Image (cartoon, rainbow, N blue to C red):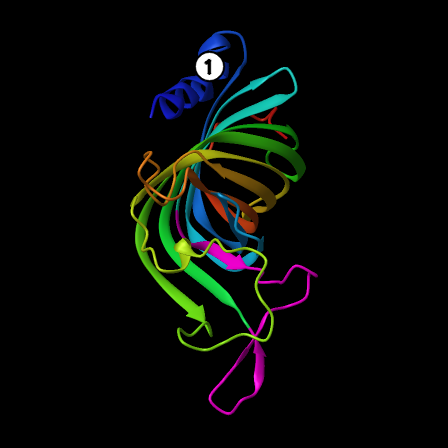
Amino acid sequence: MKYLLALCLLAFLPYTATAQVGDYRTDFAIGGSAGYVMSNVGFVPDVPQGWLPGYTAGLSVRYTCEKYFSSICSIVGEVNVTQTGWKEDIRDANNDPVYYYDDAEKMNPLNYERKITYVQIPFLARLGWGRERKGLQAFIQAGPQIGFYLSESTKTNVMLGHGTANQRASQVVAQDTLAVQNKFDYGIAAGAGIELSLPKVGHFILEGRYYYGLGNIFKNSKSDYFGKSNYGQIVIKATYLFDIIRTRNPKIK
């Protein structure tokens, strides 16, 4: 939690440092977003994985407070329902898929994936460059994010008692039978994107974002199996915002 508090203070620092010297704004916009998520979990000991596809969708708000030189300073908050988790890459020592025999004696490749749903709440400090009311703007943003566990589901054809034609290289399998133990997640989100603003229509935003989890989904004391089990997420999302409050200033373009 000390890292999360430090990030919150850093997010406010640009605004407190320049509050009296920039071109003042009071713009407030609200809207929604949806996107595609690719996730994995950083396990120690390591679990070979690919990227698990998922979704994210929710509510977005933005408060623009200042233009300092050419930088447009904003605070962005979101409440999203996000599907994350991990997908195992089960292979043998020769890097070939591991096969098992089903009841009909047919060979099938082993697969395992865990989908975990959260309510995620990022709080981001944003800097933009370009047009605010009509045209294009590029931006970067970063800040802390917290998440609250909702549910999980597993999809697998791994069956106890069925032999395999070849042996899996990784013998780390404890994660397959453990339910999520830490229901609260936190970490750092950062991204960049472009925004198209149209008068009387709104703001259309396309963004790429990365989330690095600082918490673990499983317990990590000395007596527990995993020393680390944190999320990594790549997010591609589209957002639409419409203005609720706009600063009356004809110089704003």
- Judged left or right of residue 90, residue 103 is left
Residue depicted at x 40% and y 23%: 3
Residue 207 can be seen in this image: yes
Q: Residue 176: image x %, image y %?
A: 40, 59
Which residue of the protein is positioned furthest toward the right in this rendering? 94
Residue 91: in magenta span: yes
Q: Residues within 10 Å of mark 1 (few under 14, many from 20)?
A: few
Quadrant in which the N terminus is drawn: top left
Residue 198 can be seen in this image: no
Comparing 35 with 18, the one in front is 35
Above/below status of 105 relative to 25: below
Comparing 210 with 179, the one in front is 179
Comparing 192 with 151, the one in front is 151
Q: Secondary structure at mark 1?
A: helix
Above/below status of 99 relative to 72: below
Residue depicted at x 60% and y 44%: 207
Quadrant in which the C terminus is drawn: top right
- Region in magenta: 80-109
Q: Amino acid at mark 1?
A: Leu
Which residue of the protein is positioned furthest toward the bottom in this rendering? 104
Q: Residue 7: image x %, image y %?
A: 43, 22
Q: How many marks?
A: 1
Q: Give the residue at mark 1.
A: 13
Q: Residue 233: image x %, image y %?
A: 53, 46
Say which quarter of the image contains residue 214: top left
Residue 106: in magenta span: yes
